[in-house]
Image (spheres, helix red, strand yellow):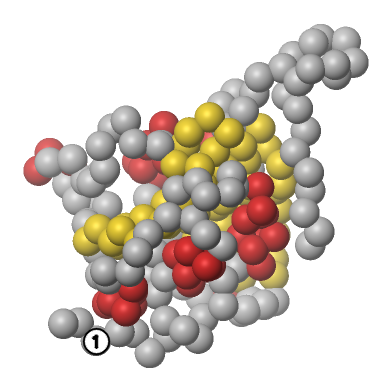
Amino acid sequence: MPTPSPHAALTPPSPWVVRFAPLVTAGGAVLDVACGSGRHLRLFHGLGHPVVGLDRDLRGVADLAGAAGVELLETDLEADPEAGNSWPLPADRRFAGIVVTNYLHRPLLPRLLDALEPGGVLLYETFAVGNARFGRPSSPAFLLRSGELLELARGRLQVVGFEQGEVASPKAAVVQRLCAVNDLAPGAGLDTGSGGDPEPRPLPAS
């Protein structure tokens, strides 16, 4: 059996994910893409959500294997598409929440939106252009361009929270963060003049 990662119980969840976790429907399934040590799998599992973790190396979550409400799938999300479909889940499988942190593979982005159920919440946080001054990642392939997550959500998701800029903790970096909901249906009784704005979501305290 693989040896559990010594960091599995030590790395705290992202404060951004913790803040917006209450927007995910209670008891709804949550997908953690590139789950690593499982810090967000553990967070949502502890909140009563069934969770699914995807990663090409599951040693960091080996201690969760077989736990009730936990599904772990070892997969290379960046496999050559000509060699087969790198998305390991059925095309019609949907989630109440999808979490991605410290990971970017642009060909997967449309797939993430398609995997959100109505009302599902996308929580995304990773490095952005400018991070090279602080170290890795430094390749443009792994750095979000200015406003890129906003462009991803445009016309598809209701943006609840967005941040972009330099941070000092947990280490100096340039990051971009998004919380967005798969709901653009016009809200009832909203006097917007256009009648097309969605019902606002509550903003959890930071």
- Measuring 66% from the left and 67% from the top, which residue is drawn there? 15
Left or right: residue 169 compared with residue 128 = right
Residue at mark 1:
3
Is the residue 136 above or below the residue 142 in the image? Answer: below
Look at the numbered disc 1 and give the secondary structure of its residue.
loop
Viewport quadrant of the N terminus: bottom left
Viewport quadrant of the C terminus: bottom right
Q: Amino acid at mark 1?
A: Thr
Please state the horizontal and vertical placement of residue 176, each as a whole percent of the image: 62, 55
Left or right: residue 87 compared with residue 148 = left
The quarter holding residue 142 reads bottom left
Is the residue 198 above or below the residue 125 in the image? Answer: above
- Measuring 62% from the left and 40% from the top, which residue is drawn there? 180
Query: In this view, which residue lies farthest toward the left?
Result: 83
Compare residues 145 and 100 and report the one nearer the observer: 100
Is the residue 189 above or below the residue 159 in the image? Answer: above
Left or right: residue 200 compared with residue 28 = right
